[in-house]
């Protein structure tokens, strides 16, 4: 009796798995990405395992397995979202790249909220200036961003104004501010003594910094090719 019941329980699972296999094969032949085919093929074993865990000998641990399963799914999604999956693995299963870490300077309105709430803080003035800098660095992707529309008529002088207003407040903890102020002075062809004084202040406040001196970076890259931005793409860098 039990043997007959066991065979009758296996039959629907085999039929379902066979149907999924046929559907996955047809989908892959017609151009489905490999990751969706693998997901479809793994659906039946995954459901069978969940049912066995819920009703079988290890059912006392079902809640523990459920927690670990949810955590694993969340971790996998997080890895895809922030492009932590190795590129070779993603390419082998035709997995599209995730959106990556959001650029909080240009996505959403976090900088605008900071400036509206704390208009006289050095941090707010710096992130606004850096936002203007990104919009005017010659990157077409930035120039056509909706946030950059309001800074279409701004230039490096505007960036320098924001940076100097932030520096005038006496902040001593934001390396990005001091570093990029030197960069702006160089790009504006400021007098060499101003550039050297700003660089000396940056080095004095952050003697353990591993960043390349902006003067050396520009000398290597050439006057017409500003070096890549060396900072974390977040408005708040703690």
Image (cartoon, grey):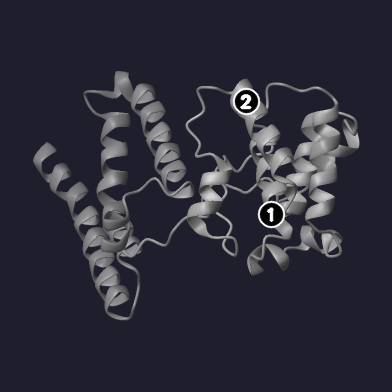
The quadrant of the image that shows the N terminus is: top left
In the rendered structure, the answer to whether residue 205 lies left or right of residue 163 reads: left
Residue 111 image offset from top left, x and y in percent: 78, 42
- Whether residue 160 is visible here, answered yes or no, is yes
Residue 198 image offset from top left, x and y in percent: 69, 34
In the rendered structure, the answer to whether residue 127 lies left or right of residue 49 reads: right
Point out which mark residue 52 bears: none
Q: Helix, strand or loop at disc 1? A: helix
In the rendered structure, the answer to whether residue 58 lies left or right of residue 125 reads: left
Q: Determine whether 64 is above or below 181 in the image.
A: above
Residue 234 image offset from top left, x and y in percent: 63, 39
In space, the residues marked 2 and 1 are separated at their CA atoms by 27 Å
Q: Helix, strand or loop at disc 2? A: loop
Q: Earlier in the sequence, mark 2 or mark 1?
A: 1
Foreground of the two, 8 or 211: 211
Q: Which residue is mark 1?
A: 187
Q: Determine whether 105 is above or below 201 in the image.
A: below
Residue at x-position 78% and y-position 60%: 148
For residue 232, which quarter of the picture? Answer: top right
Q: Determine whether 64 is above or below 176 in the image.
A: above
Residue 138 image offset from top left, x and y in percent: 66, 65
Foreground of the two, 192 or 45: 192
Q: Are marks 2 and 1 in contact (CB under 8 Å)?
A: no
Q: Determine whether 137 is above or below 119 in the image.
A: below
The quadrant of the image that shows the C terminus is: top right
Q: Residues within 10 Å of mark 2 (few under 14, many from 20)?
A: few
For residue 53, which quarter of the picture? Answer: top left
Q: Which residue is mark 2?
A: 238
């Amino acid at each position: 009796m039990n043997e007959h019941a066991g065979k009758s329980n296996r039959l629907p699972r085999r039929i379902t798995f066979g149907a999924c296999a046929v559907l996955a094969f047809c989908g892959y032949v017609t151009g489905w990405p490999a990751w969706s085919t693998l997901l479809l093929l793994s659906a039946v074993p995954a459901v069978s395992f969940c049912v066995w865990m819920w009703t079988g000998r290890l059912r006392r641990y079902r809640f523990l397995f459920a927690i670990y399963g949810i955590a694993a799914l969340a971790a996998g999604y997080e890895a895809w979202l922030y492009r932590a999956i190795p590129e070779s693995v993603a390419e082998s299963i035709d997995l599209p790249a995730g959106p990556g870490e959001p650029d909080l300077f240009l996505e959403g309105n976090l900088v605008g909220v900071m400036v509206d709430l704390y208009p006289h803080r050095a941090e707010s003035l710096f992130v606004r200036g850096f936002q203007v800098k990104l919009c005017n660095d010659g990157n077409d992707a930035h120039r056509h961003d909706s946030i950059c529309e309001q800074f279409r008529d701004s230039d490096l002088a505007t960036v320098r104004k924001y940076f100097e207003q932030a520096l005038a407040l006496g902040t001593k903890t934001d390396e990005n501010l001091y570093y990029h102020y030197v960069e702006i002075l160089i790009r504006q062809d400021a007098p060499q003594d101003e550039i050297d004084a700003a660089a000396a202040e940056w080095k004095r406040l952050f003697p353990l910094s591993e960043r390349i001196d902006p003067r050396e970076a520009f000398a290597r890259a050439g006057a017409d090719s500003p070096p890549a931005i060396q900072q974390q793409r977040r408005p708040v860098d703690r």
